[in-house]
Amino acid sequence: MIGLDTNILVRYLTQDDPLQSAKATEIIERRLTEEVPGFVSIVAMVETVWVLDRAYGLPAQKIAAAIERMLQTDVLLIENEQEVFTAMIALKQGEGSFSDSVIAALGARAGCSCTLTFDHKAARLHGFELP
């Protein structure tokens, strides 16, 4: 298994830098295999979504589609895949931010009855409550 940093994922998804994007494509499409997959940590996934949103200004639907493609890629092993999937659905349906959805899903997985927040927007997501 080979770990993948956020910048590899962003370059692959955006194809915005001729040299780095080509290297990222080579890694993901040729170097990684099902036997030697690329590991995408939950932190790298959340950072990738943040970069696509904040730095590239991509709409939530396009970001959700990119996450979905990553989840379906046989050569990528996504940490907390079920929670990432849940957060991707929430993002796709406009229910809240990806990172807030991941926080709620990870809390639920850990057995939390709820996650307390002062964020009124996050509080609309299942699993969050205002104190």
Image: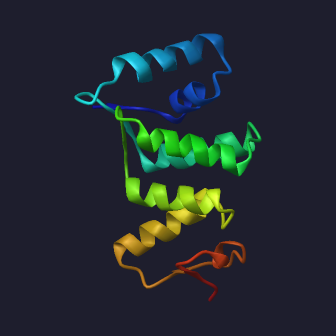
Point 73% across, 41% down: residue: 58
Q: Is residue 126 above or below residue 88?
A: below
Report the front residue among 108 and 35. 35
Point 22% across, 29% down: residue: 35
Report the front residue among 62 and 6. 62
The number of numbered badges drawn on the structure is 0
Q: Residue furthest right?
A: 57
Report the quarter where the N terminus lies: top left
Q: Position of residue 103 (x, y in %)?
A: 51, 66
Q: Residue furthest top?
A: 19
Q: How is the image coloured?
A: rainbow
Q: Is residue 81 above or below residue 22?
A: below
Give residue 73's quadrant in the image.
top left
Give residue 128's quadrant in the image.
bottom right
Q: Is residue 49 above or below residue 97?
A: above
Q: Position of residue 77 (x, y in %)?
A: 34, 41
Give residue 11's quadrant in the image.
top right
Point 37% across, 49% down: residue: 79
Point 43% across, 85% down: residue: 113
Q: Residue furthest left?
A: 35
Report the quarter where the C terminus lies: bottom right
Q: Position of residue 40 (x, y in %)?
A: 41, 40
